[in-house]
Image (cartoon, rainbow, N blue to C red):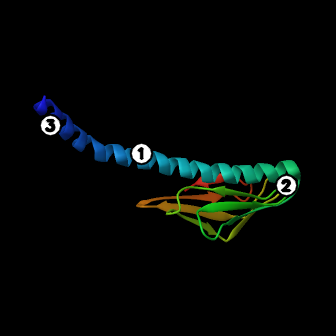
């Protein structure tokens, strides 16, 4: 019985690190999908309301603030991630267009970037 437990613990020790990396990768992809969904939500809100919607960064945490007909704060992930927006704001127009911008997200060793197409207002991965 002790030999079986020893073998199981060895197998668990070998399998644990790859499983942890896989779970981190899933969490990072979830966070990047959240960024894309927030930007799509801002575009849709501008088109349906007929008013400009501005997206900016929150100061203290990786979160996007939507300002326009409604104000909302969308938290992206854990506080250790770094969200960038260049320039500092994206303005989505009622016609479906947007100001050109680049959005980036970095956590641990992973990074992700995308651009906002000014003609369609859609997010395009780089």
Residue 87 lies in what quarter of the image? bottom right
Q: In screen coordinates, is 55 left or right of 78? A: right
Q: CA distance from mark 3 to mark 1?
A: 26 Å
Mark in the foreground, 2 or 3: 3
**Neighbour class for label 2 at 10 Å: few (<14), some, many (≥20)?**
some
Using the image, determine if residue 119 lies above or below residue 57.
Answer: above
Residue beneath the point at 85% across and 57% down: 69
Tag 2 near tag 3, CB within 8 Å: no
**Mark 2 — residue?**
94
**Mark 1 — residue?**
23
Q: Secondary structure at mark 1?
A: helix
**Neighbour class for label 3 at 10 Å: few (<14), some, many (≥20)?**
few
Residue 55 image offset from top left, x and y in percent: 72, 62
Q: Give the position of the N terminus as an image quadrant.
A: top left
Q: CA distance from mark 2 to mark 1?
A: 39 Å
Residue 59 lies in what quarter of the image? bottom right
Q: In screen coordinates, is 32 left or right of 13? A: right
The numbered mark, 2 or 3, whose residue comes first in the sequence reads: 3
Residue beneath the point at 60% across and 69% down: 60
Residue beneath the point at 80% across and 51% down: 45
Q: In screen coordinates, is 4 left or right of 89? A: left
Q: Secondary structure at mark 3?
A: helix
- Name the one closer to the observer, 46 or 69: 69
Using the image, determine if residue 59 lies above or below residue 65.
Answer: below
Residue beneath the point at 69% across and 54% down: 39
Mark in the foreground, 2 or 1: 1
Q: CA distance from mark 2 to mark 3?
A: 64 Å
**Farthest residue toward the left?**
3
- Name the one closer to the observer, 57 or 93: 57
**Mark 3 — residue?**
6
């Amino acid at each position: 019985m002790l030999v079986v437990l020893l073998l199981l613990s060895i197998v668990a020790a070998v399998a644990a690190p790859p499983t942890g990396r896989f779970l981190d990768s899933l969490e990072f992809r979830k966070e990047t999908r959240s960024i894309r969904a927030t930007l799509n939500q801002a575009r849709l809100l501008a088109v349906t309301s007929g008013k400009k919607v501005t997206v900016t960064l929150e100061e203290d945490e990786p979160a996007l603030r939507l300002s326009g007909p409604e104000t909302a704060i969308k938290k992206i992930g854990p506080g250790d991630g770094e969200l960038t927006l260049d320039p500092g704001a994206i303005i989505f127009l009622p016609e479906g267009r947007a100001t050109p911008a680049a959005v980036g997200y970095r956590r641990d060793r992973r990074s992700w970037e995308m651009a906002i197409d000014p003609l369609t207002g859609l997010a395009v991965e780089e």
